[in-house]
């Protein structure tokens, strides 16, 4: 999953990016999370939109991978490192984010087994 996330770093943000297919030239939040989970063998079929992550996997924090979802946004942590499309004014698009994000209003999920 880390290698999959690394392959998205530097791609631009695009609303709806990564939704028709796991493979795209730009990604939004749910497209990026879907791609990483797919490459990690934890999502088959099709990419999910952010609201579908409310029912993804299991409730609570994972041992290695945790997904945070609220209305209109989803991001993930892999081994404690945040991968997100939102952030400071100069860092939109799928990237590793060193700063913490406020979690108020987010539901916490994780892939089974991780």
Image (cartoon, rainbow, N blue to C red):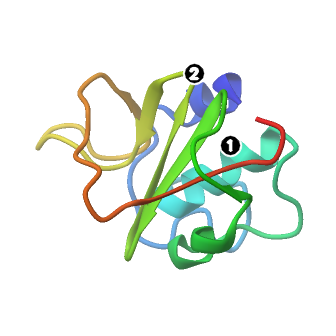
Q: Secondary structure at mark 2?
A: loop
> Given contact means CB atoms under 8 Å apart, are the residues at marks 1 and 2 in contact?
no
- Apparent side of residue 18 relative to residue 107 in the rendered image (left or right): right
Position in image of residue 36 (x %, y %): 68, 43
| For discs 1 and 2, the disc positioned in front in the rendered view | 2
Question: Of 67 and 2, which appears nearest the observer?
Answer: 67
Give the spatial CA distance, label 1 vs label 2: 14 Å
Dot 1: few (<14), some (14–19), or many (≥20) neighbours within 10 Å?
many
Quarter of the figure with residue 83: top left
What's the residue at 60%, 32% (across, down)? Answer: 5
Position in image of residue 28 (x %, y %): 45, 60
**Mark 1 lies on residue:** 36
- Apparent side of residue 4 relative to residue 15 in the rendered image (left or right): right
**Mark 2 lies on residue:** 79
Position in image of residue 48 (x %, y %): 66, 70
- Apparent side of residue 114 relative to residue 99 in the rendered image (left or right): right
């Amino acid at each position: 999953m880390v290698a999959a996330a690394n392959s998205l770093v530097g791609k631009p943000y695009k609303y709806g990016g990564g939704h028709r297919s796991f493979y795209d030239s730009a990604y939004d939040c749910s497209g990026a999370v879907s791609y990483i989970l797919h490459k990690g063998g934890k999502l088959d079929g099709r990419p999910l939109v952010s609201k579908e992550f409310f029912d993804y996997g299991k409730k609570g924090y994972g041992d290695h991978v945790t997904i945070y979802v609220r209305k209109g946004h989803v991001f993930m942590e892999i081994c404690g490192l945040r991968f997100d499309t939102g952030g400071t004014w100069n860092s939109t698009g799928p990237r590793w984010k060193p700063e913490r994000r406020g979690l108020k209003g987010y539901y916490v999920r994780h892939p089974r087994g991780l």
